[in-house]
Image (spheres, rainbow, N blue to C red):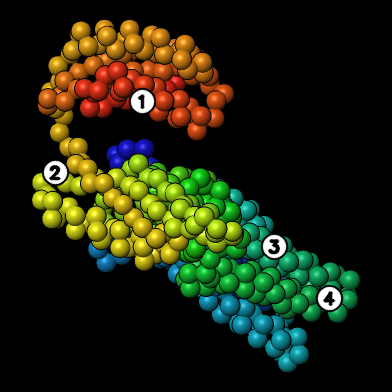
């Protein structure tokens, strides 16, 4: 998605979140007014507790509206992870307000149950306002929940959960008022306690929701990792080709964004482009679990458990910014060695900058040799051949007569080398006074690569015997279907 499209999507998200938060704020204001008037006129603790509850709902809705506005701001120099934590902090404040409400409700309910008698008038207005409250809370909780799920907003989710509990608590208050009404009609005095008991039930519901909400918000504010996410990320990342192991995973949330830091072990011989490709695929794997996550990948070069001698040598050369090729190793055993190991000799070509002097190039190769001998005790001798690192494209001239002669010679090669099916695309050029030749050789695709290499070596030896003027002869091998 382009930057312009990203900005449009963010503006649309902020507009929708602000709209639903503002509607919730206005609904809270209406309910506080209605419940307060009816609660005072009926002296119902259940209704008054709901009025107090809605009063804090009004404050909470205001905090949510403010937090949604602020959390939508982009990251800046002072808030490099954005302003998403404002949403989590607002949810934390809501929890505190809810618990204060519960403390007052419990205190007043205990007083009315054991120490103070208050006459409750369960009028039609009390039932009406609670029914209106249930209806409004139901629809605004659904609207908040829809937007919260759409944009993964914890502040709006907290409000939605809050107002769903209002539906339950308002239903309990209606049950309490019904009990008082029956007590008056039927003369059952025990039912007069239904109103403060209903208030205690309301407080219990609110405490239960508050504890759940408080734990979630505190976890986010303290950067606790979301449950189960770390293991999911580790499993997904470990399955990416090129990752040796996952050394560390850290996750944190800020608003509706998740930040993931991953430290991985990758083969130390992998080049920069390969490592970057691994990093891209790791990011994709993490976002497959956490869509939209901000992923930071740190790579640590490590030696694989099965790293070969040749890869170890390449790693040492790379440490000195040198390219090596034509690596070969052989072990010279004493005649009566038995199980005793012989001398392990390593031969390699080292490519150096063409601007260097012999002394400077030798010093570079010598450092690599010494480090190989120090880190690889098995190796007893290192022989390096210094070559020039190619950096320029040299002009070349076609040699038509020599090309025709070489083609004629190679045409007979399959008679001498039965596994060689065909030789074609022969080219000969003169480059800076040196004669360079190449050809394509068709071999059975089922041949082991070692056998294919031996065939090309044999073909090169036979060709050089007839054309000693060749400075370089490159043979490209291919199966029949690729010709």
Q: Nearer the viewer, mark 4 or mark 2?
A: 2
The local crowd at label 4, few if under 14, some if 14 to 19, many if 20 or more residues have their Cα within 10 Å, is some
> In the rendered structure, which disc, 3 or 2, sits on the residue that comes first in sequence?
3
Give the residue at mark 1: 461
Q: CA distance from mark 1 to mark 2?
A: 29 Å
* Side of 284 where 437 appears, left or right: left
Residue 447 vertical position relative to residue 228 in the rendered view, above or below: above
Residue 369 vertical position relative to residue 93 in the rendered view, above or below: above
Q: CA distance from mark 4 to mark 3?
A: 20 Å
> In the rendered structure, which disc, 1 or 4, sits on the residue that comes first in sequence?
4
Give the residue at mark 4: 191
* View extreme (front): residue: 335
> In the rendered structure, which disc, 3 or 1, sits on the residue that comes first in sequence?
3
> In the rendered structure, which disc, 4 or 3, sits on the residue that comes first in sequence?
3
Disc ID at residue 168: 3
Q: Nearer the viewer, mark 3 or mark 2?
A: 2
Helix, strand or loop at label 1? It is helix
Q: Answer whether labels 4 and 2 touch (C-beta < 8 Å).
A: no
Helix, strand or loop at label 2? It is loop
* View extreme (bottom): residue: 115
Give the residue displayed 48% in from the left and 69% down from the top.
223
Q: Answer whether labels 1 and 2 touch (C-beta < 8 Å).
A: no
Quarter of the image with the C terminus is top left
């Amino acid at each position: 998605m382009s930057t312009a499209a990203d900005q449009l999507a963010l503006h649309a998200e902020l507009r929708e979140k602000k709209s639903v938060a503002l509607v919730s704020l206005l609904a809270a204001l209406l309910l506080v007014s209605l419940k307060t008037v009816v609660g005072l006129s009926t002296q119902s603790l259940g209704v008054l507790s709901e009025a107090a509850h809605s009063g804090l709902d009004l404050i909470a809705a205001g905090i949510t509206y403010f937090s949604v506005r602020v959390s939508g701001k982009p990251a800046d120099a002072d808030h490099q992870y954005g302003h998403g934590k404002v949403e989590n902090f607002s949810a934390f404040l809501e929890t505190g307000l809810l618990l204060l409400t519960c403390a007052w409700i419990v205190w007043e309910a205990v007083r009315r149950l054991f120490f103070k008698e208050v006459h409750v008038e369960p009028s039609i207005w009390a039932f009406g306002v609670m029914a209106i409250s249930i209806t409004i809370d139901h629809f605004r909780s659904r609207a908040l929940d829809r937007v919260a799920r759409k944009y993964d907003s914890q502040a709006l989710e907290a409000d939605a959960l809050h107002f769903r509990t209002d539906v339950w608590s308002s239903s309990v208050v209606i049950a309490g008022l019904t009990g008082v009404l029956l007590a008056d009609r039927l003369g059952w005095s025990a039912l007069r306690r239904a109103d403060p008991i209903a208030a205690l039930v309301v407080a219990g519901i609110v405490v239960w929701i508050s504890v759940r909400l408080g734990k979630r918000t505190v976890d986010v504010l303290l950067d606790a990792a979301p449950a189960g996410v770390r293991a999911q990320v580790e499993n997904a990342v470990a399955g990416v080709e090129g990752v040796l192991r996952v050394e560390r995973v850290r996750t944190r949330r800020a608003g509706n964004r998740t930040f993931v830091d991953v430290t991985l072990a990758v083969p130390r011989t992998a080049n920069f482009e390969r490592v970057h490709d691994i990093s891209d695929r790791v990011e994709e794997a993490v976002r497959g679990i956490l869509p939209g996550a901000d992923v930071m990948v740190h790579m640590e070069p490590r030696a694989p458990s099965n790293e070969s001698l040749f890869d170890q040598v390449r790693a040492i050369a790379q440490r000195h910014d040198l390219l090596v090729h034509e690596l070969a190793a052989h072990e010279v055993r004493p005649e009566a060695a038995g199980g005793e190991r012989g001398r392990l000799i390593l031969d390699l070509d080292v490519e150096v900058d063409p601007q260097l002097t012999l002394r400077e190039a030798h010093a570079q190769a010598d450092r690599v040799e010494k480090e190989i001998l120090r880190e690889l005790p098995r190796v007893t001798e290192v022989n390096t051949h210094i070559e020039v690192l190619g950096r320029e494209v040299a002009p070349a001239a076609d040699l038509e007569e020599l090309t025709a002669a070489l083609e004629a010679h190679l045409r007979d090669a399959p008679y001498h080398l039965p596994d060689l099916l065909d030789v074609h695309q022969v080219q000969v050029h003169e480059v800076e006074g040196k004669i360079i030749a190449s050809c394509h050789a068709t071999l059975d695709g089922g041949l082991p690569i070692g056998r294919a290499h031996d065939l090309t070596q044999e073909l090169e030896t036979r060709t050089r015997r007839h054309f000693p003027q060749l400075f370089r002869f490159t043979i490209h091998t291919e199966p029949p279907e690729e010709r």
